[in-house]
Amino acid sequence: MIFRSKVTLLAVLSIIYLFFFVIPRLSSDIDDPDLVEPSWRWQYTRPATLPSYRAAPPPPTDAIVESSIYTLLNPPPNGDNHDNDEQQQPTPTPPIEQEQQQQQQDAPSYDPDEKFITFFTHSGFQNQLIQVENGILLAWYLNRTLILPRALLGEAFGWSYFGKLHLEHMLHDPVKENDSTMPATDICEFLADDLAFWDVPCPDRSRHSVVPFDEIFDLSWAKEHVRIVLRERSDFDWLEEKYHIRRAGVPDQGNGSYVDGDILFFKGATRYDWRIFDTPRKSHRLGKYAESLDIFELRKRQEKLIHFSSLFGTGKLPIRRPEHYEFLRTLQRSITYRHPAVLAVAEQIVETLGGQGNFIGLHVRSGDGWFVKALPENIYSIVSQIGKALESRSSTSQQQKVITSSTSTPPNLQQCLTMAKRGEATMIYLATDARSPRDNPAFAPIWQRYPCTFTLDEVISLEAWDALDRVLDPNTGNSMRKFLLPLVDASVASRGWFFIGSKGSTFSGYIYRLHDVFWSNAKKQQLIDPSSSS
């Protein structure tokens, strides 16, 4: 047989092999439900046997916020309605009923087939929120219940190994008086050996506050798609008591992935440990992450609990599927502040500044790390962006009045409101972590170019200050004012007609989101009810 005939024969045989063997196999792989699974198959469906879960109430309506403002800023004098209170005292519960109620509370209520996922939060408050968003997304992917740690406001701790993060969370757990589960009178005394091993100081409870995330943020949309429960205690005994999640006594491996009884651990050796992908591939772009996982691997795991040391990082869960991106986008836009005191005080300050859309909102981070060195450059960039924003706004084409501190006394709030109404000045609200920004030379370019710039201390009323002061930490009894003020700052800045943040700040990123959500909702409301626009 000549060479050309041999080549022709081989080509024909190759084509036949492709059509009858390779292509059908590829088609069957694509249709394999374990490889590419329709999203609806793993959306959360609550089993009928799950214990009842009381979700957080929906975010306050405008009417509730207005009522909260009045109640918070105008508390009733002592003694009012005292007689009425006496009449409404509850009837004491008989001892037998008390015992029955206690037995019902102590009785285990759990679904033995329920699967869970959890992690330890760390770093600043805004970075904690990013981890929570990652946790909700991953729980949705895996159809698992999310055991969510508390939010830590105030003095935080950074990333570390699993053992140290676990210790930090136990140290920050609320401690109840006369708690029989505490062998020692002080948590630091009880964990003294661990503190010495990890070289961790005993935290000062006056410098932080721990509260459930859904007391600060609106998680109602998330709870429609993922079952979320509070991690009441950080120790492993609580997991066993509450959900019968047990360890088998496997020696602690420090770092890495391994199984111990009902728990699959992912203990990261670096801050950027596992990158979790939403599509299966032979190889993934890891970037700065050490290893890869995909949600199809994790869905096959039968352990009752998957426990990550951390879910840190905006790039930890890269998304390729459009429906996954839409879920995350909707989730992020749904998570806004819901704390009544924060909303009430922010609303009052916005009105003091002339109402929503009457000012530009700024956020300047300057208190720590890289932001201290970058402050002058950051200020210069913000001043430049203000100018560009004013130029692009057709209604602000008038000349801007310039007042420098060396030639004139800065105008007060009322003067600025009057000038802004006449188009002679631009109102600006400056949210910042700087202690005394007016005394800091780095901030001078803002006030020199835009003298009608005000900070929270300059516009908050004494009544609003006292209202925040009356919000008490349920665990310590201390005022939570200093922990709530940054949230008020962010809320007010987001109500400006334009917002400018600090480059690289996750907090600025969140305020951008609040700004976008607020004004998108305002425009929708105006389309529905044109009379609602101010």
Image (cartoon, grey):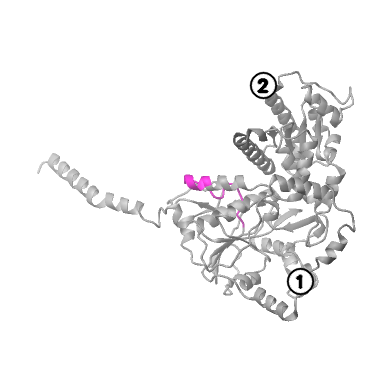
Labels 2, 1: front one: 2
Q: Residue at x 47, y 46 (%)?
A: 321
What residue did someone put label 1 on? 190
Q: Residue at x 71, y 26 (%)?
A: 384
Residue 151, placed above or below residue 2: below
Q: Residue at x 68, y 65 (%)?
A: 232
Query: What residue type is disc 2 on?
Result: Ser
Query: The N terminus lies in which quarter of the figure?
Result: top left
Indicate the position of residue 251 as horizontal and vertical percent values: 59, 72
- The verdict on residue 54 being magenta is no
Q: Quadrant of residue 7?
A: top left
- Residue 436 in sight in this render: no
Looking at the image, is mark 2 or mark 1 earlier in the sequence?
A: 1
Tell me: 293 left or right of 34.
Answer: right
| Residue stretch in magenta | 310-326
Q: Quadrant of residue 102?
A: bottom right
